[in-house]
Image: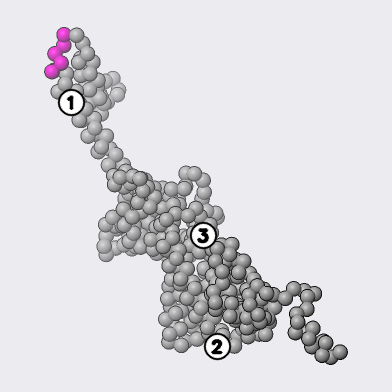
Amino acid sequence: MTFGIWPVQPFLPRIVLKMAQVLGHIPGFPETTGRPIARSARISVQWRAKMKAEKQLKIRLIDPGVLAEKPGNIGMPRNAEEAGLANSACTLPIRIQTFGRFSISVPARSDCPSGKAQQRPLALLKALAAKGGHDVCCSLLWECLWPDSDGDLGARNLTITLHRLRQLLGHNAAVLCHDGKLSLNERLCWLDVWQFERIVNDGLHLAVQSRNKEWEASLRAALHLYSGHFLALEAEESWMLTPRARWKIKFERAVNALYSYLEIEGRMDGAVDLCLQALELDPLNELFYRRLMGCYLKRGEASAVARIYGNCRDALATGLSARPSDETDHLYRQAVGGSPGTERRPGVETKFPLRRLCNRL
């Protein structure tokens, strides 16, 4: 049906609804005649709006360029163009860094996109990385990002944000969706937490088998990759704490394993450098201070032991309102004697040198 050159059919339910509302207000017009017409027209308008919204959401969630998201084909290219993209060195990988400073490196884009319009897509990417990046349930993600939203609103927000994240990463296949779960595509994305866990697990496994050269190289590569705690410079959210603690424990295990090996080999200079590097990333870890004090003690540098002990005491008091443990105090007493807090001041002689001087006289 057309009126002049304009089609009337898409607007017919709204026209009928308006006419029924007008007729219901005319004096003497039967009210019972306008109500059924208005009800039918209103239902038709709501149904059309619902169908249109659902169609748009489906288009946003499953784009034509997305990989075939079937159980046997997750991460597999659908055509030759995507297969070439997955193996192209000039466009791969999409690098995502979460240790320390969060950043992403997208092909044909030199810096990490920022701005208010990108906050939600980036938050979705951070939450996806915090959950491991593989088979993350959608309900967990919208509970992290929209905790006050109900299921329908959270699902709609997640769908829209997922579409914007795919646009930000430059490829629809960068984030896969299957069976209500999201995953980063390993053929297109490089995530530092994946690489870190893989290297640390391999290194510790080789350490058990006493393959010294191989596991030392693996653990050093892992420590080089760990440039800070997980999302350490981002605004703290509750869902960040558990993965941050898990990867911090892996970092500590790698440092302790490598330190023990260097200590056995007698490479104290390398052990000192390792402890200093670890303290730069975790200045409140008392074990690293104690390891460093042990290195200086074996090298006979009592003044360095006292200096590190003072740094440890001040850091723990400021950051944790705590004091060093008995083990740390014991190392300090071994180095300088006396009890902690009685360091010798420059220019003030103790009674022992004074007694020796009197005996000479």
* Picture mark count: 3
**31 within the magenta span:** yes
Q: Which residue is mark 3?
A: 232
Q: Which stretch did the figure color magenta?
A: 28-33
Please identify the quarter of the rendering in which residue 326 is found. bottom right
Alpha-carbon neighbours of circle 2 within 10 Å: few (<14), some, or many (≥20)? Answer: few
Mark 3 element type: loop
Residue 15 location (% of width, % of height): 24, 22
Gap in angstroms between the C-alphas marked 1 and 3:
56 Å
At horizontal 31% and vertical 53% (from top left) the residue drawn is: 139
Relative placement, left or right, of 268 versus 214 is right
Tell me, yes or no, whether the two marked residues, 1 and 2, touch with CB atoms within 8 Å: no
Q: Nearer the viewer, residue 131 or 114?
A: 131
Please identify the quadrant where the C terminus is shown.
bottom right
Q: Which residue is mark 2?
A: 264
Gap in angstroms between the C-alphas marked 2 and 3:
33 Å
Tell me, yes or no, whether the two marked residues, 2 and 3, touch with CB atoms within 8 Å: no
Task: Name the disc covering residue 224, or none.
Answer: none
Which label lies toward us, 1 or 3? 3
Please identify the quarter of the rendering in which residue 31 is found. top left
Gap in angstroms between the C-alphas marked 1 and 2:
85 Å
Mark 2 element type: helix
Q: Which residue is mark 1?
A: 39
